[in-house]
Amino acid sequence: MKILIIEDEPSIAEVVAAYARREGYETSWAPDGETAMGLWEKDGADLVVLDLMLPKLNGEEVCRRIRAQSQVPIIMLTARGSESDVVAGLDEGANDYVSKPFSPRVLMARIRAQLRPVREDHPKVKGGGAPLLCAGGRIEVDAERVELRKDGTPIPVTKSEFLIFSTLASRPIRTWSREEIIRSALGDDYEGFDRTVDTYIKNLRKKLAEQGHENGWIRTVYGFGYRLDDTEAQT
């Protein structure tokens, strides 16, 4: 598997590349956003490590352009680290983030988590089998293909979005707190703001919404969390 490292500080890029190669990944490096897009267009990648503060083309725009073409996992590196900056990056389609300064071992654990097959990563969808149907049978959660479909049409979602929707669909009459969603969908070792769940939910709603279901079948239970709306789970 190949990792594209987009980072304008050579010393940081070299450390990330060294750790990645030690675990058997191929790496390529871009020091700015324009070079990154050239490498992406030429060779692609299985995962992108993306610094947000880049010369020539900023990280948010690079993320937006890559996400328009592919659902490849994107892990942001941010020196800013505030909740609003992280949310902005996730809004552009990033899967996860690591704040600078960071431990290379932690970053590698995040990389492994993003590249791990979904059925190994999430016990609720482990083993595949028939798709889980919800929203009166209109939305399918297909663990075998790692795919969400609405009325038979695949909906492009990130791995984190898929796991979060799968969690909600696994018990559709239950209301889940943000902490429970993180623990069930993203794992006990997830280190991040619990409010980032709101961003994943917002992105899912945007992708699933239609007239009469502007919330994408995901209801906010104020003061607690989320549950699927108008859902009849079937197997």
Image (tube, rainbow, N blue to C red):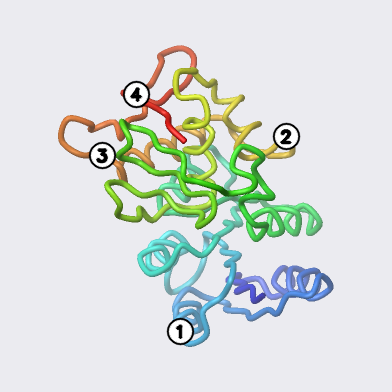
Q: Nearer the viewer, mark 1 or mark 2?
A: 2
The answer to whether marks 4 and 3 mark residues whose Cβ atoms lie closer than 8 Å is no
Left or right: residue 40 compared with residue 99: left
Residue depicted at 37% across the width and 37% down the height: 202
Residue 38 is labelled as 1
**Mark 4 = which residue?**
229
| Type of amino acid under label 1 | Gly
**Mark 2 = which residue?**
188
| Type of amino acid under label 3 | Ala
- SS assignment at label 3: loop
Looking at the image, residue 4 lies above or below residue 128: below
Looking at the image, residue 147 lies above or below residue 36: above
**Mark 3 = which residue?**
209
Distance from disc 2 to disc 4, alpha carbons, whole Å, reads 26 Å
Residue depicted at 54% across the width and 42% down the height: 163
Is residue 70 or residue 155 the one in the foreground?
Answer: 155
